[in-house]
Every structure is written in structure tokens, then in C-alpha cells.
Image: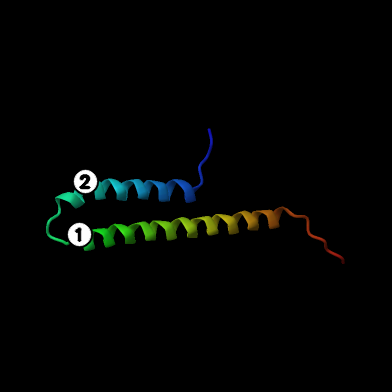
Amino acid sequence: MRKYRRSVWLPLLLFLYTTGMAVYFLPRNTEISDTEKYCTIGLSYVIIGILWFLLRKKERLARKREEDLKKPENHTT
């Protein structure tokens, strides 16, 4: 079984959840304007994009740290 990275499944799950909530609830909400609706959804997608970027960066740094620990050190003593 293939293990998916957190930087893939977490933003994807949040994206699907946000889209589902927008499709279901926003047409029924008449208390806010259309501009506010679109700004809310847009901001949610921006936050998900930032999360995706930061998780990728964190995974990349962790991978680099692991590689550095595996490298044999050259000690000249």
C-alpha cells in the first residue's frame, strides 16, 4: 500500500470539504452579499494553498535532514 504524504492528502481533503460546503451552503445563504461569499471562498483556497506550500517545505527539510544524518562524516582526527 502506498503511503501518501501529508502535503498531498491534508490540503486535498480541506479543498474538497471547502468546495462541498460552498456548493451546499452558499446558495442558501441570503444574509451576505455575493462579493462576501466569493471573497470567503477565495480566501479559504488561498489558506489551503499556503498550507500545501508550507507542508511541502517542511517535508523537504525533514528529508534533507534525514539524508544529512545518513551521510558518513569525514572526521580527520
Q: Please name whichever residue, 21 or 64, is drawn nearer the observer in this view of the structure.
A: 21
User: What is the image's colouring?
Assistant: rainbow
- The residue positioned 41% from the left and 47% from the top of the image is 12
- The residue positioned 83% from the left and 63% from the top of the image is 75
Q: Is residue 26 left or right of residue 9?
A: left
Q: State the quadrant of the C terminus.
A: bottom right
Q: Quadrant of residue 33?
A: bottom left
Q: Position of residue 68 (x, y in %)?
A: 70, 57
The residue tagged 2 is 24
Q: Please name whichever residue, 33 or 56, is drawn nearer the observer in this view of the structure.
A: 33
SS for dot 2: helix
Q: Residue lying farthest right?
A: 77
Q: Mark 1 packing: few (<14 Cα in 10 Å), some, or many (20+)?
A: few
The residue tagged 1 is 34
Q: Amino acid at mark 1?
A: Asp
Q: Residue lying farthest top?
A: 1
Query: 77 above or below 15?
Result: below
Q: Position of residue 24 (x, y in %)?
A: 21, 46
Q: Quadrant of residue 39?
A: bottom left
Of the two numbered discs 1 and 2 on the same chain, state the one appearing first in sequence: 2
Q: Please name whichever residue, 10 or 24, is drawn nearer the observer in this view of the structure.
A: 24
Q: Position of residue 46 (x, y in %)?
A: 38, 60
